[in-house]
Amino acid sequence: MTDHSIGKPALPAAAAQPTRAWRRRAFVREIFGIVLGVLIALALGAVASAIGWQIDAIDARRALALELGEILGQAQERVIARDCIEHRLDAVAAVLDQAAASGQLPPLGDLGDPPRRT
């Protein structure tokens, strides 16, 4: 027996007071509705958390890829500049050896700096 206008079970027609069994069923329905609502909320929270972690992982991968690309580019630049730097250091060493032998340091001007990266 249900009262279609309200959507809740109607009281038994034979009794004006609800029976103990009817009250128990109504209580169990209420508890079930609350538990089901909490479980749905927990499941949605877990899904949202998982999606958030996936977004964080994608952002981290993107940042790592950018940094790795920068590091590889700088390493390639250092490999290319290595011969030039070695040649310049050999020239400075020769000038210093000559200065040590003669006792005088000739004017060199700006020695320059190797490329710096941070």
Image (spheres, rainbow, N blue to C red):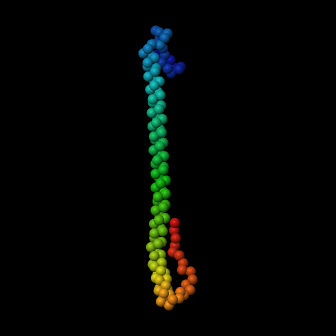
- Give the image location of residue 54, x and y in percent: 46, 48
Q: Up-down: is 3 above or below 80? A: above
- Give the image location of residue 78, x and y in percent: 47, 72
Q: Up-down: is 61 above or below 23? A: below
- Give the image location of residue 86, x and y in percent: 45, 79
Q: Residue furthest front?
A: 103
What residue appears at the point 48 percent right and 18 percent down from the top-left corner?
A: 9
Q: Residue furthest left?
A: 21
Please count the marks in the image.
0
What residue appears at the point 49 percent right and 64 percent down from the top-left corner?
A: 70
**Can you see residue 2?**
no
Q: 38 or 114, which lies in front?
A: 114
What residue appears at the point 46 percent right and 20 percent down from the top-left corner?
A: 26
Q: Quadrant of residue 109?
A: bottom right
Q: Quadrant of residue 29?
A: top left
What residue appears at the point 47 percent right and 80 percent down from the top-left corner?
A: 89
Q: 89 or 53, which lies in front?
A: 89
Q: Up-down: is 92 above or below 60? A: below
**Can you see residue 43?**
yes
- Give the image location of residue 43, x and y in percent: 45, 37
Q: Up-down: is 92 above or below 63? A: below
